[in-house]
Image (spheres, helix red, strand yellow):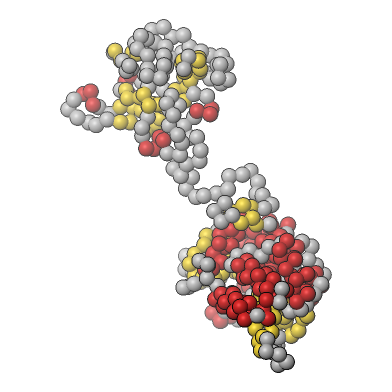
Amino acid sequence: MLLEIFQGQLRLDAPTPWGIFFQDSATPQMWSGKSLAGSKLPNSGDSLKPLVPSCSRKAISGWTNHSCKVTSQRMKETEMGYRGSKSGIVVLSGMKSSVKEQRVDGSWCGKLLNNNNNLPHLRCTLTGFERNYQVKILSTQIVKKPRWYSTARCDSSLDKKHNLIIDPNFITGFIDAEGCFTLSITKSNIVKSGWVIKPRFQISLHEKDLQILKSIQSYFCAGRINKQGLESYQLRIDSIKDIQVIIDHFDKYPLISQKFGDYQLFKQAYELWLNKEHLTPEGLRKIVAIKASINNGLPEGLKAAFPDIIPVLRPQRENIMINNPQWLAGFASGEGCVMVKIRESKTSFNAIVELVFQINQHIRDVQLITCIAEYLNCGKIYKHSKNAVVFKVSKLSDINQNIITFFSKYPILGVKAKDFKDFCFVADIVNKKGHLTKKGLDLICQIKAKMNTGINLKD
């Protein structure tokens, strides 16, 4: 059973293989009301043309080409008739339904041969009610850049590929540990001011933590991840639109380390940049003065170019308080360290196994370290060097009751999650006195060798 065409018209006595019957142009009886399928379509008064299933790769990409949902037609341009949309009644498996035909601009088929029957033909598309329209799901042909399709950003995000749920407070804690706010100022002859200014947010991690880097990228729906060196990757966010996403997040979930000062200065520079003040000499000097107080200050090249710049006053974080346990989980995922130490005993033949949880910070964040110790209600704080302070927990009862209990409820993410799992396993052996046996001690030594720098992601 094939469609038959005679002088450009469809024979009414020639049903399609799918049971579709179209109105002949000689007897146009068009449907203009609400169809049985629940779709109301305008009536142009023109008849429908005969259609056949489309097998075009471009037509079927991203959706399933079920019979009667999308069809194409080979016909001459002169036989097209009215080129707008028009509707008519068709019978689908014995049920009446309304359909709409639309021209596909620029689509044609056929070859230019001596035979006039093979001249280029226009391809038309037939669509029914909305759920039968061509694009059934998002397709890579119309979506060039993967994005999250939502009218609003969620407070938490599921990275489907890596199955990591990222809490916004966790994000802030992790960035308090590992994030960096910076201003790129480079010489250029292209712009009138002679300098190109670009605010940039970035996180650089070892390749072992690429998983968590991708999850943060998915959370923000922004930025790009690039290889950095032999064993590191960097997430970089520097577009105007994406920087605003970063600022919106940290205004809602504030940083509590002294990195808060970097963020506030970064935000000031971004607002100057957004208002195009960096294109003026005065605005440029303001941004250079801000950069002088961020991170490590001005590099030698900028010091030479702007010798009289006075750094702006750096904002200080006052009244530090941990308001959400997920912040601490994120911060520990970046700066925390769990270790197993084994040393000989001076009073017995048995070795001493010590479990340690530790966080090291710059001396300027001593208030934050004190706050963490109070929050976990355990550990000691001591000065490690001239510019470093350490929070350390080594008492076994504190390890069991405070550290393991807390981070079992609010998990550490990334590669350190494997370290923490091994850490808990060793703690269980020690709690059962297994370390006092040769077999138990050998097992602890094997686990210790694989932790931290010795970790193997394939295990």
User: Of all residues shown, which one is farthest toward the left?
Assistant: 114
Q: Residue at x 45, y 34 (%)?
A: 64
Residue drawn at point x = 60 percent, y = 59 percent: 216
The answer to whether 213 appears left or right of 67 in the picture is right
State the image quarter where residue 199 is shown: bottom right
Q: Residue at x 52, y 24 (%)?
A: 129
Is 316 located above or below residue 438 in the figure?
A: above
Query: Residue 103 vs residue 199: left or right?
Result: left
Q: From the viewer's perspective, is 272 left or right of 378?
A: left
Residue furthest bottom in the image: 346
Whether residue 245 is visible: no
Looking at the picture, tell me which residue is in the foreground, 407 or 202. Answer: 407
Report whether residue 226 is seen: yes
* Residue at point 77%, 70% (across, down): 402
Number of labels in the image equals 0
Front-most of residues 134 and 314: 134
Q: Residue 382: where, in percent of width, then height?
A: 76, 84
Q: Quadrant of residue 278?
A: bottom right
Rendered-image quadrant of the N terminus? top left
Rendered view: 291 above or below 149: below
Q: Is 337 rendered above or below residue 276?
A: below
The correct choice, above or below, for 256 with respect to 389 in the image is above
Q: Name the one closer to the observer, 355 or 109.
A: 355
Q: Position of residue 4 (x, y in %)?
A: 31, 15
Residue furthest out toward the top? 27
Residue 263 picture location, percent across and down: 68, 67
Name which quarter of the figure residue 370 lies in.
bottom right
